[in-house]
Each structure stands twice: as C-alpha cells, then as structure tokens.
Amino acid sequence: MSYAPFIKEIGRGPKGAKPLTVAQAESLFGDMMDGRVPDLELGAIILSMRIKAESLDELIGFQRALDTRTAHVQVPAGPRLVVLPTYNGARRQANLMPLLALLLAREGIPVLIQGRHDFESRVSPFELLAALGITPASSIDEAEAQLVDKHLACLPLSALAPGLEPLLALRPRLGVRNSSHTLAKLLEPAPGHSVRVVSVTHPEYLERMHAHLVAQGSVALLLRGTEGEAFANPRRRPQLETFAKGEARVAFPAEEGGAPPIEGLPDNPEVSANAELIRAMLAGTVAIPQPLLDQVSALRELSRVPRD
C-alpha cells in the first residue's frame, strides 16, 4: 500500500495540512499498529501529525483502530472498572498515582493500572508500584482474578495492545512524542464497563480530549496530570471534568494558588521514600491531600454510572 496520499494531505504544515477522514485515520493507524508502514513513511506520518496535531475525526479513527486491537478484561459485578494509565513517572515530586489506585480499591472499586515506562530521567512508576507490593500480572486471566480478590491489578501495555508499544518506543529515537502517546491514555480494555482516567500534559489537549470524550459518549475523568501522571496535583488541584455518556461537567474547578510542599518529603524522592509516604497516608498518619480526595470522590461517582 502507498502511504504517499496520506502524507500529502497531512504533511503540509499546520496551515496547509488537511485532516484525514475517520475511515482514513482508522485504516492508517491500524496499519501503524500492525507494523505494515515502512520506517521512512512511518517517520513522515509521525512528524506530520506532530506538527499539525490530530483533528477530532482523526482521533476517532485512531481510537477505533486501537479498540479493535485491544485485549478485553472482564470486570467483576458491581462498580465500573477505573482504568488508570501510567506512562511518565516522577521527576520533581512524589508520584501519588498508586495512592489514588489504593484508595479506590479500598472502597471496593476495581482499578486496572496500565502502562509502560522508558524515561531514563524519571523514576519508573513500576518500581514504585513494586515497592508497594503491586507487580504487573503475568496474563489477562491473572489480572481478572486480582480484580476479584484485591480490586486492583496492573498490566503492561504489551499485554493489552502490543501493536501500540513499538510506536511509543520511537520517542527516544525520534526525540518527540507521537499520536500513540495520546491513544495510550485512551486505552479501553473494558468497553461499556469502565471509567477511563484521561491525563494530559499540555493544556491545549484538554480541549481536544474534551471534544473526543463527548463524541465517544465516554464515561471518563479528564484532568491535567501531575508531571504527566494521572493524579490531581496535591499542591494545586487541576480542574476535574467528568464525562458520562455524552454529557460533561466540571466536578471540581481548578484551584488558584497552591498548597505548601508536603512536610517531610524532599523533592525528587527516592522510591523507598515515596512508597513510605503513600503507606503513611493510607494509615492516616500523614494527611491525604485534598485534591486526591476530590479525585477519589469524582471517580467514585463515575464508577456508579450504570454499565452499558
């Protein structure tokens, strides 16, 4: 297949490029995930999309391609499954993503952590999870059993959408992120039975993800993440926007100003210090930051939305 017609449309820069149709985008991203696109054309496509940014139709098409190539996870009866992505890790402050997952699981809300890590300059979230006794399941079946027994499971991206992983792995080689990084945080392994936590890093993606989640009729929580991780900044809560079957509302507005640093926690904490902080918060000896409690509250409400 020739990919020149696609590149001709999307490769003319931010002003001259034309968006692909939903069908074109689905076909193209499907070929990218299936490894059919030669390296030269793949690089051209990735950089063209990086420069022009994805349109709503393109995101919908990319999502459809991803959905047909994503493994499904069976969810226990009861609340919806909260799907929590982790792809960045900690850089300057504590990573409280595991705290969010453990707080939800403690309430009986099933949580699936999914992701991968390849940032040499950041502390791996999987090292932190391991320090808390949370290790990736060896299979979908094992993850499903853990959701029943512990209300918490972790799966690597390779187990859920193996075709997406090589695209994310191009970041160190090319030096820039690509559309697969956006799609990874939209992964839906339990369609109709889940709540996706959609975390973005750059403010312009809030508007783009808002339109996408409304168009999809998703049940989801959208926020600007903390250093890219999907938890509310403990020092200044971002806006927490919820989506339920086509309707969006602001569950908690963004806070102005910020709270002081968490006492006793240094910047750039080591894994052991980060894990100890989370244990102390779970035990009640250190206060849980209010933005995290607000996020738990919003996700608790979404988990009760009737399943499809």
Image (tube, grey):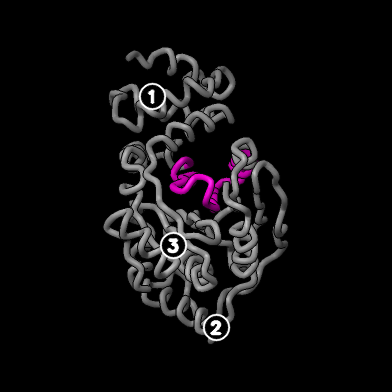
Which residue is drawn at the image coordinates 55% and 81% (left, top)? 263
In the visual, does 201 lie left or right of 279? right
> Which residue is disc 1 drawn over?
44
Front-most of 123 and 307? 307
Distance from the alpha carbon under mark 2 to that under mark 1? 50 Å
Which residue is drawn at the image coordinates 46% and 45% (left, top)? 187
Magenta residues (range): 182-209
Front-most of 162 and 245? 245
Would you call the spot at circle 3 few (<14 residues within 10 Å), some (14-19), or many (20 or more)? many
In the visual, does 147 lie left or right of 215? left
Residue 21 inside the magenta-drawn segment: no
Would you call the spot at circle 2 few (<14 residues within 10 Å), some (14-19), or many (20 or more)? some
Hey, which residue is sitting farthest front in the picture?
A: 77
> Which residue is disc 3 drawn over?
90
User: What x and y, as percent, mark residue 1?
Assistant: 32, 14
Q: Earlier in the sequence, mark 3 or mark 1?
A: 1
In the picture, residue 288 is in which quadrant?
A: bottom right
> Which residue is disc 2 drawn over?
286
Distance from the alpha carbon under mark 2 to that under mark 3? 20 Å
Q: Amino acid at mark 2?
A: Val
